[in-house]
Image (tube, rainbow, N blue to C red):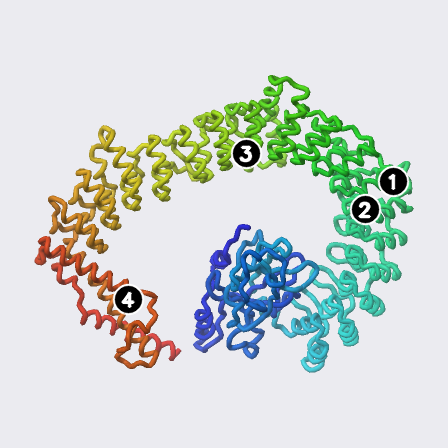
Amino acid sequence: MRFTSIASCLAYLGIAATTASAAKKQEEEATSTSGGVTKAQGPPPFFLQDTTDSLCLHGETFKRCSIDTLFFVVGSPGSYQIHKRPLSESDADPDGTCLSKLKCDKIDPSKAATTSSSTVVDAKLAKCTHCGAKSWNIHGDSNTGYVLTEASSGIQQCIVRPKGTNMVKLAPCDSTDHPYTPLQLQFASAKDIEAMSAPGARLIGAAADGEKKLVQKLLKEEKIDVNARDWDELTPLIPAASSGHLDIVKLLLKEGADVNAKDKDGITALMEASIQGHVKIVDYLIKEGAEVDATANSGVTALWLASGEGKVDVVKALLKKHADPNNARADNISALMTAAVGGHADVTKLLLENGADARFADGDGVTALMNAAENGTTDVLKLLVESKSAKQDEDAKGRYVDLVSNTGFTALIIACAHGHTDAIKYLLTNAKVDVNAMHETHVTPLMYAAASGHIEAMKLLFDIGKVDVNEMHSNGGSALLEASTGGAGEAIKFLLEKGAKPDLIDMDGVTPLHAVTSKGDLDGTTALLDALRKKMSKAELGEHINLPSHSGGTAVMFAAAGGHPKCTKLMIDNGADVNAIAVARPDYLEKLAKMIEDGTVDPNEDPHVDGVTAVHVAAEEGHLECVQLLIDAGADVTVLDDEDRTPLLLALKGNYGEVASVLVKAGADPNTPYVDEEGGSHNILMDSIIVENADFALLLIEKGADLYHKDDHKVTTLLQAAHRGIVNVTEALLAKHAAAPKKGEENWVDEGSDEGVTPLLASASEGHLEILNMLLSTGKADVNTKDKEGTNSLMAAAARGHLECIKALLQTKGVEVNAQNTDGHTALMFAYNGKNQVETLWERYAQFITDAKMEKGEGEDGSADKKDVDDGGTGPLIQEALTNHTTLVDLLLRAGADTTLKDKEGHVAADFEFQPDADAELLEREEKAEKKRDESRNEL
């Protein structure tokens, strides 16, 4: 599972997950434009919704989304607190109410994936100070859904909604018995919150929750309209009926509730009660005038909804009141179909007895019998086959059991595709289906069973249906080819035993061997090779293995492209040509163009390119083991395809570093230019240095990469390596240059960028002492070279406080200690300035210690030991830096630095020295300004 932190989602929406203190500050300090103090908006509230039924996380349970299912986040990823939004200020707990868990006992990671009670715990709402409320994270995105994780027990536990319940649990995120529940994160606007806070919404919520006394109070004392609606156009009656609260249903109807009111989806109280199986409420609503055949926006009635859920008592009650048994949804899926696909035999029987038409088909020509075959419930199949409507006009309309949908399915085909053996046996033996009834594409039941690897289903087709193992569909494929395409090894073996032809070639030039190697099924591949050997000579077998499909692909290419090393090796061991080049046939390209034109193929998903080899397709997908196998077998890694791409380029495009390394070792050109998606050209060596992949850079240098490449800003590979401090790469570059310097590049070691920065200057600025010494030892790096601003290596090192680099530079013959840059600054001035900054930092640190002591009541002088204050280790770091800068200044002075030199503004080096009084004055001004700002806020 790939996780994306909620922080990225919030940032995308222009919102930031706030800390608790920031959230509190927002709540307390926000002001209205009129000058009065108002309550802040605070962090954005949101719902966490299960899209399977649109219920929202409430705490211990999932319930209908409402104002009391809103949360907001404070903190940072991994330590989020998921706060329950209080319904009102009076409801707010001073500590806050947060999503938590029942207990925080540490869990042994070795038991994390078990189903023991110690690893699956209840979620709950608790004070935000609870141990289980402080370690949340939210991962995912709007496409995959968001996953809530909690880590206080030492492992990652995810929010889980057990199937068939509304409970909320936490289980190990990798648990297979308790898979996590992805949720949708829906932010609520101020308008949404206003709507959810309305009196009518409160009444609806009370009715849904079965709070009879509150419902009575809201109706009588607050005079809320009994037919009030919320943002979903719900009235109180609808959720009361859905939740099974008969007493509240009666109360609402007595107070004048509209029994036939519909929500925004056209759902009525009767429909909600029906789908939930509340038969007493169904009876009562009908008695009070509910329209039995009222339709929702989708066209369904209460009967349709009850049928799909198998609510047999409700179906009886509705049919007793003459509900339409043939009601169908807008897409022509009938009540009978939805009962059949659910395997609800009792409901199916009731519907048929009351006039449901078994022959009725949806928009795709699918019948209830086909739906039943998908489920595999034999009792439902029998009811449908033996029904009166199924047998009507069979001579004119065709046998019911053999009807074919517009999409090519029969009941038998669907049962075979799903491997429902009891259903297959019933259809073949009792219903006497025609095993040869099929679509014009001639895809047989055997092919569907083979594609999914259903051996027992295939046995029934052979034993009872007497099917032909080598029958072909309209594209020339057989059951064996379909089994191979599905990677169903056992099915392949079974079909070969039944006499399937292993050397079949379909109308796209695809063989079973092509298909099975693309899926990586080693057993199936081995079985096919064994069968081929029995009918072919060794030469013929080799020719078959290297036979290209009409797209140009061979078996070894298909295996390598799929990343299947065992099948790749098997093909190589049996004579596969690893240097075969794919060239598509013209008729294949015409067919492909037609499919692209018709929209059945996405041209961008897997664009066809001629000229590729097995190494190309393996490298493009990053299949390292396959690439290595092909290289070991003699594959040429320098071949260009028809778009002038080498395997190395394809590996680089996919960012497959290990594959690229293997290809370079095998002879791929290390100077191959790479063009990115935006059309920008890249040098491989330079890019490897930039991303600090030293091993790959060293390999490229060893294999002949151009050392002298420069980017658009004249940055050399040596300058880049020196700047980044990559010692071994810098050493390799210098050694290669020294061994065979390129003509015209004699000054390469000291060559600067368009800003005048040289490798030596860069290493001095970054404090890379080993590289600096390495460059000085060549005798080619000029210690006094300046950049465009006149800064030399000594100044750069002094500015950053790199003492050891200063020592090395001062020991270099000819170093100019008193050189000045374009502003007139010297190395000594830079050194004093750095010392000044550290001393200023130290003074502020001392003030921090004093303030901390005062907070502890230890006196204004802060005389207590600094060790009593937790400074996170800051003090020693500042002291070390100060000692370093002081030594640096002394070193420059001893080396002859001139203290009288002036910069362009007339300052000497001492002017950059730390001035305690001036700094104290600055601090005082800042404190006064802050006090003034505070007073301004208080006045406001």
For marks 3 and 2, give the CA distance. Answer: 45 Å
Question: Height in image: 308 above or below 563?
Answer: below
Residue nearer the viewer, 226 or 911: 911
- Label of residue 368 in the image: 2
Q: Nearer the viewer, mark 3 or mark 2?
A: 3
Place of residue 462 in the rendered image (x, y in percent of width and height, measured from the top left): 80, 32
Place of residue 6 in the rendered image (x, y in percent of width and height, measured from the top left): 51, 58
For marks 4 and 2, give the CA distance. Answer: 79 Å
The reply to whether callout 4 and callout 3 are in contact (CB within 8 Å) is: no
For marks 1 and 4, give the CA distance. Answer: 88 Å
Q: Nearer the viewer, mark 3 or mark 1?
A: 3
Give the side of residue 737 with respect to residue 665, left or right: left
**Mark 4: amino acid:** Gly
Under circle 2, the secondary element is helix
Closer to the N terminus: mark 2 or mark 1?
2
- Label of residue 819 in the image: none
The residue labelled by disc 1 is 431
Q: Is residue 477 visible?
A: yes
Closer to the N terminus: mark 4 or mark 2?
2
Q: Is residue 756 visible?
A: no
Q: Nearer the viewer, mark 4 or mark 2?
A: 4
For marks 3 and 1, give the CA distance. Answer: 47 Å
**Mark 3: amino acid:** Pro
**Mark 2: amino acid:** Ala
Closer to the N terminus: mark 3 or mark 1?
1
Closer to the N terminus: mark 3 or mark 2?
2
